[in-house]
Image (cartoon, rainbow, N blue to C red):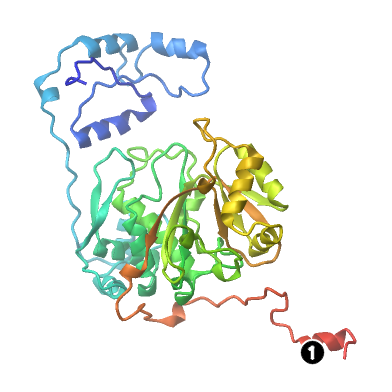
Amino acid sequence: MEDAGIPTAPMATAHFANYMARDSQIHGVPLRFSFPPHPTAWVSREIHHQYVEGDDPITGQPLMLEVIDTLTRPLTEEEKHPAALKRPRRPRLLAPDTEDNLRRLFTKSGWTDGLPIILPTEERVVEMLTGTDHDPQEVMGHMSVTPHEEKLEYTVEKVAINAVMAGARPEHFPVILAIAATQRALIPSSTGSWAHMVIVNGPIRNQIGMNCGSSALSPFNFANSVIGRTGTLMSINFGDINLAENFTGGAGNNFNYNNLCCGENQERSPWEPFHVQKGFKADESTISLFRGWSMQGFSVGPAKRMAELMTKMGYPVTFILDPLVAKGLKKDGFETKQQLAEFLVKEARTTWFDGKPVDPSRISFIVLGGEWNPIFMTADFTYLQTEPIDKWIPKKGITMTDPSYRMPAQAICSEGVCGLDLDLLREDEGVK
């Protein structure tokens, strides 16, 4: 605050000392931090007084004397003319080695999510790049795991490397590039352990075999799994995540493994698809990102039950609706998602953190599931943005290199008679 002429003594709890030192180096702003003990949240007034009257756990000096020194001692020449720390660029290629040794290197270096990877050999990366016409060296954006660190540059080729590591195929690459185009780290550094959800809309869902129906948010689908996992690996590598240095997740979040990635079940929904609400055409393909902490369990009931749950949460939510729920709500008179949102806001009397009424457009409805039961989930995920996929698809169409990679397609059994010979069933029941 030298330019403003205001003496300033920044503070952070001792738990964040390494984090702040790294941040100061990267930005070339060597602030004189003092570090009271950790934590400060939900700690009694008496303990806070002990913090103030005690020593800085990092330096061992009296905390208040440090603050006074920071406010009164003139800046040194080094502090007046700091140099920002630039992280060296990683080499494009690694030295040749055995497969086992390279796997160990990737794991030890923190370049994976802890699960086995496919090694990104030059041949595999070249194959992945057939999934788009874009130049491999085209800069896609910049990413940081925190909003304060140096944002690292990444290219189409670097995205392809992470897609190979996740086990993806060229057919998945346009969707992955759209995720990369958001320039968001899907594992943000927060003590609250945020997660993301990726919802795919449009024709590409069916073209690449994504699951939008039964168990769409579960395993069992190759495309959902590898696309979502690539988002995690890009966050780790483009965001340069280092635990306890620039990443401060508390308990962490299991959703980060594949970021709740699936398609919306547009074909079974009575309403317009989510991406159409956001201004896209029905025949366009998109990804939509949401950020939150958790799913609040399974519920049944009419719109008033949804409003009751929203009241308890106290802020805008995203509802994950089985198609049976959506169809039931339409029968109850909710012709559009907008009508339903307006009803919920009025019924729940929900306000945002600043006390202002919730804008109905902040409530999202995603239709997915297998129509086994009229169940919905309430999530604290908030909509962030929608990105187009089509611009990443090659002019010749989606690259399908090996259809055998697809997992068995699930049977569509909205009437509950999948795999049954109805004539035999009627005979067993004595029906002619």
Q: Is residue 108 visible?
A: no
Write down the residue under mark 1.
Answer: 423
Q: Amino acid at mark 1?
A: Asp
Report the quarter where the N terminus lies. Answer: top left
Q: Residue at x 52, y 64 (%)?
A: 273
Q: Residue furthest bottom?
A: 432
Residue 124, image x, y percentages: 29, 73
Q: Is residue 66 visible?
A: yes
- SS assignment at label 1: helix
Q: Residue at x 35, y 52 (%)?
A: 235
Mark 1 nearby-residue class (10 Å; few <14, some 14–19, many ≥20): few
Q: Residue at x 46, y 51 (%)?
A: 290
Residue 103, image x, y percentages: 33, 61
Report the quarter where the C terminus lies. Answer: bottom right
Above-or-below relation of 49 to 369? above
Residue 49, image x, y percentages: 45, 10
Q: Quadrant of residue 25?
A: top left
Above-or-below relation of 375 to 208? above
> 285 or 233: which is nearer to us?
285
Q: Residue at x 40, y 8 (%)?
A: 53
Number of dots carrying numbers:
1
Residue 266, image x, y percentages: 55, 68
Q: Quadrant of residue 18?
A: top left
